[in-house]
């Protein structure tokens, strides 16, 4: 693949030539996407299916011990790690899990929900029982060392106040997360267009650290955290999930692309919808979207400066991209 450096840079999207599709294309949120893109791109460049790429890619992040995604993540305010994930294929099939505990790869459980049940979303104990029945082992319930420290520190004030882009203010999005008593949150989302011209997407998260017990964000909600329409495009979101849910954010992005907008224009329009809803409060919110359309055009947009995404195309070897933003 060539160089896999992670220095972010601004780049103008390379749009598809008229009547010619650019493929494959792979996008994933934040700098964790650099590592996640590696196995996903191997699948895509060898003419594999986009669905397999987006599952295997985010599994890398789920398996890492960090404070944002996977079992090493920061817990809820009761001290338990709960995970959410979704996946969607080129046929419009989709599966999700939410409030899932002690399972290492929720995105793979979400795929089993999609492929082996008549349902879209399983939650909590039921999701865990289904995972175990499918051969996923129950992992130890103990917190990671970083999460233990973060939780002990959080208990001193018990304040829930996520900070915009805190993941980029210290050592990247998957570093220990306490800064001045405030806490980060995040997600990895991945979307792909394969050599057959088909789209798929995935999204996985532990949600906001120190959330209320039972809180579920946008990531496992089809049409909020993730949406794929193989005739039009795919989109995934990151940031404050409640705000994404309120506008059905990724479905909105895809519908804007259906109207003829480029992926960047569609992401910007969805961001503007959130800002309009929140007025002056928007300065304290971060939400970002990334999208690909059927022609292989791609783009992203965020409310605040600081968001980035990892990109692979035939011309771009796994680079971090700084998209445009409103504030």
Image (cartoon, helix red, strand yellow):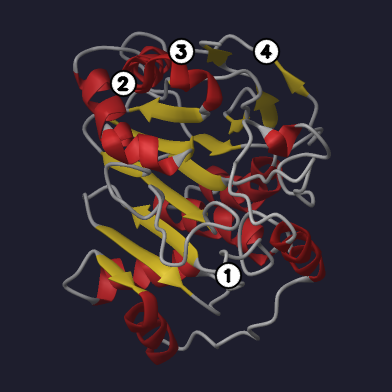
Q: CA distance from mark 2 to mark 3?
A: 31 Å
Residue corresponding to mark 1: 81
Sooner in the amino-acid sequence: mark 3 or mark 1: 3
Q: CA distance from mark 3 to mark 4?
A: 15 Å
Query: Mark 2, mark 4: which one is toward the viewer?
Result: 2
Q: Position of residue 239 (x, y in %)?
A: 51, 37
* Quadrant in the rendering for residue 34: top right
Sooner in the amino-acid sequence: mark 1 or mark 4: 4
Q: CA distance from mark 2 to mark 4?
A: 29 Å
Residue corresponding to mark 3: 15
Relative to 133, 307 lies left or right: right
Q: Circle 1 sits in a helix, a strand or a loop, which is it?
A: loop
Which corner quadrant holds the C terminus?
A: top right
Q: Any mark on residue 277, and which?
A: 2
| Mark 4 surroundings within 10 Å by alpha-carbon count, few (fewer than 14), some (14 through 19), many (20 or more) | few
Which corner quadrant holds the N terminus?
A: top right
Q: Residue at x 75, y 46 (%)?
A: 181
Q: CA distance from mark 2 to mark 1?
A: 31 Å
Q: Circle 4 sits in a helix, a strand or a loop, which is it?
A: loop
Q: Are marks 3 and 4 in contact (CB under 8 Å)?
A: no
Sooner in the amino-acid sequence: mark 2 or mark 1: 1
């Amino acid at each position: 693949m060539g160089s896999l450096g992670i220095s972010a840079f601004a780049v103008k999207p390379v749009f598809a030539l008229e009547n010619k599709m650019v493929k494959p294309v792979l996008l994933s949120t934040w700098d964790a996407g650099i590592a996640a893109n590696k196995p996903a791109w191997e699948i895509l460049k060898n003419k594999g299916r986009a669905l397999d790429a987006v599952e295997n890619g985010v599994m890398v992040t789920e398996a890492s011990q960090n404070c944002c995604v996977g079992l090493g993540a920061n817990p809820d305010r009761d001290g338990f790690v709960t995970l959410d994930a979704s996946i969607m294929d080129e046929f419009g099939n989709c599966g999700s899990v939410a409030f899932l505990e002690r399972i290492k790869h929720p995105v793979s459980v979400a795929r089993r929900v999609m492929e082996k049940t008549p349902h879209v979303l399983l939650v909590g104990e039921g999701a865990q029982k289904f995972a175990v029945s499918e051969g996923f082992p129950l992992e130890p319930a103990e917190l990671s060392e970083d999460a233990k420290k973060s939780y002990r520190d959080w208990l001193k004030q018990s304040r829930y106040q996520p900070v915009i882009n805190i993941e980029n203010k210290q050592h990247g999005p998957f570093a220990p997360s306490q800064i001045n008593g405030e806490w980060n949150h995040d997600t990895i989302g991945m979307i792909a267009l394969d050599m057959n011209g088909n789209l798929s997407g995935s999204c996985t998260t532990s949600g906001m650290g120190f959330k209320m017990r039972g809180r579920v964000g946008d990531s496992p909600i089809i049409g909020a955290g993730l949406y794929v329409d193989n005739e039009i495009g795919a989109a995934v979101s990151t940031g404050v999930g409640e705000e994404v849910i309120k506008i059905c954010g990724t479905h909105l992005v895809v519908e804007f692309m259906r109207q003829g907008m480029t992926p960047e224009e569609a992401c910007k329009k969805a961001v503007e919808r959130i800002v309009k809803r929140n007025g002056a409060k928007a300065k304290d919110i971060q939400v970002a979207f990334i999208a690909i359309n059927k022609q292989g055009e791609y783009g992203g947009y965020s409310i605040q400066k600081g968001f980035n995404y990892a990109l692979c195309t035939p011309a771009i070897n796994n680079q971090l991209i700084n998209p445009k933003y409103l504030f």
